[in-house]
Image: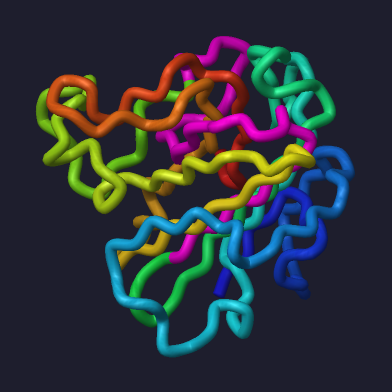
Amino acid sequence: MRIRALALAAPLVLLAGCTNAIESGAPSALVTNASAWTIYRSASPSPTPSAEIPPSTVASGTFLPYRPGAPAITYDPAVVPPGATATLTITDLPYGTEVRLQAGGLIPSRAYGAHLHTKPCTGIPDEAGPHYQHHQDPKPPSVNPIYANPKNEVWLDFTADGTGVGAALSMHGWDFPPSNPPRALILHAEQTQTGPGEAGKAGSRAACLTLPGA
């Protein structure tokens, strides 16, 4: 299995033999109680615990104001303070794909929207493209709940705890094609809406983390 990584932050799965590593700062270790995970599921749990399988993709960074080449950017410091951190892992499992997000240094008790997007981060929030969709909506921008939903997209909304730490898990019965994987994680200022004409909307784009290969 080819392993793509930016930087690995404890306490996630320990990786060996990672290639193409790009240092993006040293995020502080996160201690997240398992009961605090927000879970999105479109597939049955894997018969093999994911902790026994190393992730195929790891992205980790410390959010700072934009600078060229920065993998982690905060666009709105009032929502994602400089110095906040995020670690995202994608694990290929027998049943499909598991995506985990852990974040820290955020506004305590604040709700966030989070999704995987199609393009890498730049200094302009919208340039990260739309949400990644397994089945693409033929009429973009996608606000149709038939396509803009947590089973067809990767939603990772969470509410930070009293210390500013949050976590989410998204499990799917499908895989990311190697030729067209998601390229960024976006943290949004609001949690994701689900109604017709509003599905997938989550307020402004507050921060962006570029994924490996972008």
Residue at screen point 65% across, 46% down: 166
Percent of width and height locating residue 30: 79, 54
Q: What stretch is highlighted in magenta?
A: 98-127
**Per the image, is 115 magenta?**
yes
Most foreground residue, 102 or 71: 102
Most foreground residue, 86 or 139: 86
Percent of width and height locating residue 19: 73, 61
Most foreground residue, 31 or 86: 31
Q: Which colour scheme is used?
A: rainbow
Q: Is residue 34 left or right of residue 205?
A: right
Residue sitting farthest toward the bottom? 47
Q: In this view, does 213 lie to the left or right of 15?
A: left
Q: Is residue 66 left or right of residue 200?
A: right
Percent of width and height locating residue 141: 23, 20
Residue at screen point 81% across, 39% down: 24
Residue at screen point 58% across, 19% down: 206
Number of disc labels: 0
Q: What is the quadrant of residue 145 in the picture?
A: top left
**Per the image, is 103 magenta?**
yes
Most foreground residue, 74 or 211: 74
Percent of width and height locating residue 13: 71, 71
Q: Quadrant of the N terminus?
A: bottom right
Q: In which quarter of the image is the C terminus?
A: top right
Residue at screen point 23% across, 36% down: 148
